[in-house]
Image (cartoon, rainbow, N blue to C red):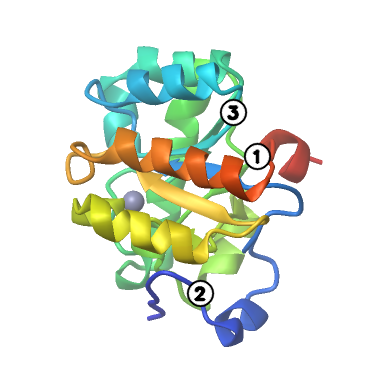
């Protein structure tokens, strides 16, 4: 089982060259674990106000109860991506179970927006040597990250410290549309936008960067 915290070590990146580890152009915003009635609309408004296109890695179990939010995410021009159905750690599942978790989510999303997701992110960022083959079979590209905002720890000062220290012009940054980050998510995103502005970074469009 492979695990890392804020920044993925080089040795892992070299072992899995088929995965996306950073942005070819501009900072990419990625949001995991949604959709939620509590936060998704705030995120959509924020991204619309700042003309940002993001990647939303959605959980099938939450898609099932919030299909209208999935339609909104899609109609706002964001990429609707797969984050499995139940958020289980892939290395603990059999190949068949892992494939089921992924296909079930793909099928549900496709039934709502009529488009099959092209991108995937594993729960907890956990994968193993079987993962590339499973994803190839499911026609999904794995998008990791180069900066974990640590928003799920719920401590805004820690998030600010991580972002001001590690945000780069080609970062793929991850935030969470879930209860753990709820209290600080908006401030975390506002702070990131401030740093981007101050540093003269640009924000990338994931559709243009990755959909080819
Ligand atoms: Zn997750």
Q: Is the residue marked by circle 3 packed among few (<14), some (14-19), or many (20+) residues within 10 Å?
A: some
Residue 113 shows in this picture: yes
Q: Which quadrant would the C terminus be assigned to in this image?
A: top right
Give the numbered dot on residue 25.
Answer: none
Question: From the viewer's perspective, is residue 38 above or below residue 200?
Answer: above
Image check: 181 left or right of 109? left
Q: Residue at x 59, y 28 (%)?
A: 52
Q: Secondary structure at mark 1?
A: loop
Q: Nearer the viewer, residue 58 or 128?
A: 58
Residue under the point 69% across and 42% down: 202
Distance of mark 2 from mark 1, alpha carbons? Answer: 21 Å
Q: Please tell me whether mark 3 sits on a helix, a strand or a loop.
A: loop
| Vertical order, 157 against 108 (above or below) | below
Contact between labelled residues 1 and 3, with CB atoms less than 8 Å apart: yes
Marks 3/2: CA–CA distance: 25 Å
Q: Quadrant of residue 96?
A: bottom left
Please give the residue where the numbered disc 3 appears in the rendered image: 52
The answer to whether the residue labelled 2 contacts the one labelled 1, judged by CB atoms less than 8 Å apart, is no
Q: Which residue is mark 1?
A: 203
Q: Under 8 Å from ligand 1: the CB of mark 3? A: no
Residue 36 in percent (x, y) is at 27, 27
In the rendered image, which residue does mark 2 sit on?
8
């Amino acid at each position: 089982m492979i695990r890392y915290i804020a920044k993925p070590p080089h040795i892992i990146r070299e072992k899995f060259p088929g995965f996306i580890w950073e942005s070819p152009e501009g900072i990419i915003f990625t949001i995991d674990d949604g959709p939620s009635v509590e936060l998704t609309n705030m995120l959509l408004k924020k991204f619309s106000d700042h003309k940002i296109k993001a990647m939303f890695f959605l959980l099938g179990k939450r898609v099932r109860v919030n299909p209208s939010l999935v339609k909104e995410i899609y109609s706002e021009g964001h990429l609707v991506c797969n984050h499995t159905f139940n958020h289980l750690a892939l290395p603990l599942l059999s190949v068949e179970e892992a494939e089921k978790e992924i296909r079930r989510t793909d099928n549900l999303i496709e039934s709502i927006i009529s488009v099959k997701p092209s991108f995937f992110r594993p729960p907890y960022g956990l994968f193993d040597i079987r993962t590339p083959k499973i994803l190839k079979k499911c026609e999904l590209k794995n998008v990791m990250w180069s900066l974990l905002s640590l928003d799920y720890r719920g401590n805004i000062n820690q998030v600010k410290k991580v972002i001001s220290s590690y945000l780069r012009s080609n970062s793929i940054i991850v935030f969470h549309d879930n209860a753990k980050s709820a209290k600080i998510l908006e401030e975390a995103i506002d702070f990131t936008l401030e740093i981007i502005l101050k540093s003269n970074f640009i924000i990338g469009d994931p559709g243009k960067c990755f959909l080819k």
